Amino acid sequence: MEYISLFVKSIFVDNMVFAYFLGMCSFLAVSKNVKTATGLGLAVVFVLAVTLPLNYILFEKVLKPGALVWLGESFAEVDLSFLSYIVYIATIAAIVQIVEMVVEKFVPSLYGSLGIFLPLIAVNCAILGGSLFMQERAYANVGEAFTFALGSGLGWFLAIVAMAAIREKLAYSNVPKGLRGLGITFIITGLMGVAFMSFMGIQL
């Protein structure tokens, strides 16, 4: 039940886009059509689902204070937590590089559509934010970390695909000239954020 609660909350209550407004650069730039948004969203889900558990293990076994005690009693006082940012970013960058090569090899059309935004997943603050939230919330085990990662990724995926669907419809709407493009997109993002606040009442 705890895993279900964590999974649902990470999608709806703690949505990376609508609750914390993380990953907004990619969210706004790539949410112009559903196909491209779906491709990037799936890539973000995969990167989060892989990197966050890896970073959890690295933090628990290497970085946090006293984590290196398994090397011997003389390492019991070692604290490498100040290296967290560097280690997390390095892990994320490595996984993103693998994703980029796979997409370029097997789905070249999607690779061309995503352009620079695919490698920029490495600096997507939603990805790094997931690892930092994981560290701050001190999840009990790697299973909880993976559940949070999967839910957060699906939440970001849901947000960008929903926005892309709305923006495709807006192409046929009579939007005032001064609000066309990013203007109306910001307004819709804010309204969707308010709508997602209704999920804060979920009790699991």
Image (spheres, rainbow, N blue to C red):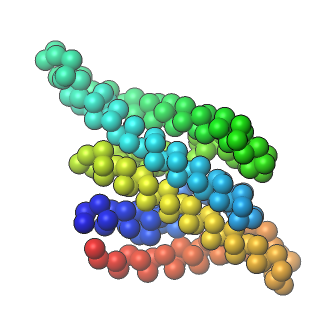
Q: Is residue 194 left or right of residue 104?
A: left
Is residue 21 visible to us here? no
Q: Seen from this angle, which residue lies furthest bottom?
A: 174
Quarter occupied by the C terminus? bottom left
The number of numbered discs placed on residues in the rendered structure image is 0
Task: Judge left or right: residue 75 versus residue 154.
Answer: left
Instruction: Name above or below for residue 183 compared with residue 152.
Output: below
Q: Position of residue 61 (x, y in %)?
A: 28, 30
Q: Is residue 16 above or below residue 170?
A: above
Q: Is residue 64 visible?
A: yes
Residue 160, given in percent of the width and then of the height, sits at 62, 64
Q: Which residue is at a point 50% across and 56% down the rendered structure image?
A: 153
Residue at image position (25%, 66%) is 1
Question: Between residues 155 and 182, which one lies in front from this camera angle?
Answer: 155
- At which x and y percent is residue 142? 30, 44
Where residue 86 sits in the image (x, y, percent)?
47, 30
Residue at point 59% right, 78% down?
191
Q: Is residue 38 left or right of residue 4?
A: right
Q: Give the quadrant of residue 6.
A: bottom left
In this view, the residue in front, 41 or 189, is 41
